[in-house]
Amino acid sequence: MKSFKIAISGGCHSGKTTFIEKLQELMPDDIIISDEVIRSKSIVSIDDIRNDPHKYFEFEMDVIKEKCKVDMERSKVEDKIVLFDRSIIDSLFYITFYLGYDRLPNADKPIYKEFIARLNRSIHRALNELYDKIMFFEKIPIVEKSKFRPDDLSTLQKIESINIKELLNEFLEYAPDKIDFMNQLGDNSISRFIVKVQEKQLMNIDYLKDYASYKKKVDDLILFNTIMTNNFGSVIYDEQDIKVMVGSSLLYSTKKEDSDYIINCIKLLETDTGFMNSRCYPTGLFEDGNIMIVGEAPGTYGRAIKDYLKPAFMYAKTSMILRNSILHTFDKMPYITNLNKFAWDKNKFNLDDVNKCRDIFTIELDYIQPKAIIALGNNVYETLKTYDLFPPVIKVMHPTSPCYSGQSIEDYRNKFKKDINNGL
């Protein structure tokens, strides 16, 4: 693997550092991090420094100079993925937005002009020689205190996100293929990078037999996959191993524009039942003519980051049972979705909510044109019978049955496979 260098950009509290640290945890042998230099500085609070223009100017010059030096050193590493915690364009935003020429003492103004000119040259060099990608993360609306974050964080989240994005847009003229914003990921490079993370974690599929092992794998991957899917949509499918996809909480796709559209439709879905954070995106393989597996609704367990979607059929023991059965039944990964895109109170089936989500489900059917639909349990099967469907609908026992009946996972898996083969 050649060196692949990615700068992570975005306003305050958009999941950047958490994302980077999680990647390093998942791939310790393959990830090199160029840290956000400011976090190594000993300060009381960022607000205190910003109140003194001269003090803040000296502070930012020191931080930016050190960042440029450290970033350049890290970029020379071979055969690694290098993650830069903030791009140098972010540094330009902070020194201009929170400082400004007019606020400076007269003695600092000539130095400021010269420094900004040099910083712009550093940005052009980084875009041409240093970064393979800049990934812009939208804000996550969760507020937590930190001495490196200002007190009025909730207001500044929006201000910083908008302004840094605009600044990145100005540099698109010089690097149109290197800056990726939300839902604008157009090539395979990041997709292959995502899959590589999955392969590192999912080479051994034995954990699908044991819920404790399965839950640990899911918990290890879920923050990474949730942030990637909510910011960049589905992953471009490139004949990946089925074992990677079975254990993955991503949506792989041969038609990224269509599969991303479905994810965005679910993002726009609102519910007044208090389950906004249980909304789920489909997982598996989005491909023309694929098998579609349909459940009732996501459970309440494993809710997503606030205002983010979570993956369908990943968290509970039923998910492990289902994926174990898929592994032994299909040559390639089916498309997994739910009739309803958010959880129900006490998991009680609610036909009104199903009807609310029916338009999205209809789009899924139109886009995929599945050769068969696998209905998980009676409620899904009876509901689908009322739809005007073209492919056969095959009912299988819901994967909760081994949890309550004493049936073994192997017995469930064998019946699952038999019922599907008989229905195809």
Image (cartoon, rainbow, N blue to C red):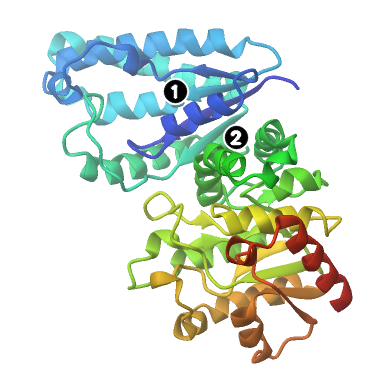
Q: Which residue is mark 2?
A: 178
Q: Quadrant of the C terminus?
A: bottom right
| Residue 162 picture quarter | top left
Q: What SS does tag 1 mark?
A: helix
Asked whether, in this view, residue 79 is left or right of residue 61, the answer is right
Residue 55 placement, left or right of 241: left
Please give the residue where the numbered disc 1 appears in the rendered image.
Answer: 88
Three-letter amino acid code at disc 1? Ile
Give the image location of residue 47, x and y in percent. Answer: 15, 26
Left or right? Give the position of 345 relative to 392: left
Q: Is residue 241 above or below residue 53?
A: below
Residue 367 at x, y = what percent? 71, 72
The crowding category of the residue bearing disc 2, from other C-alpha atoms within 10 Å (few below 14, some 14 to 19, many at least 20), is some
**Is residue 306 at least partly visible in the picture?**
yes
Image coords of residue 36 (percent x, y): 40, 20
Q: Report x, y in % for residue 394.
A: 76, 78
- What's the amino acid at mark 2? Lys
| Image quarter hosting the N terminus | top right
- Element under label 2? loop
In this rendering, position of residue 312 left or right of residue 304:
right
**Nearest the eye: 60 or 399:** 399
How dense is the environment of label 1, judged by Cα within 10 Å: few (below 14), some, or many (20 and up)? many
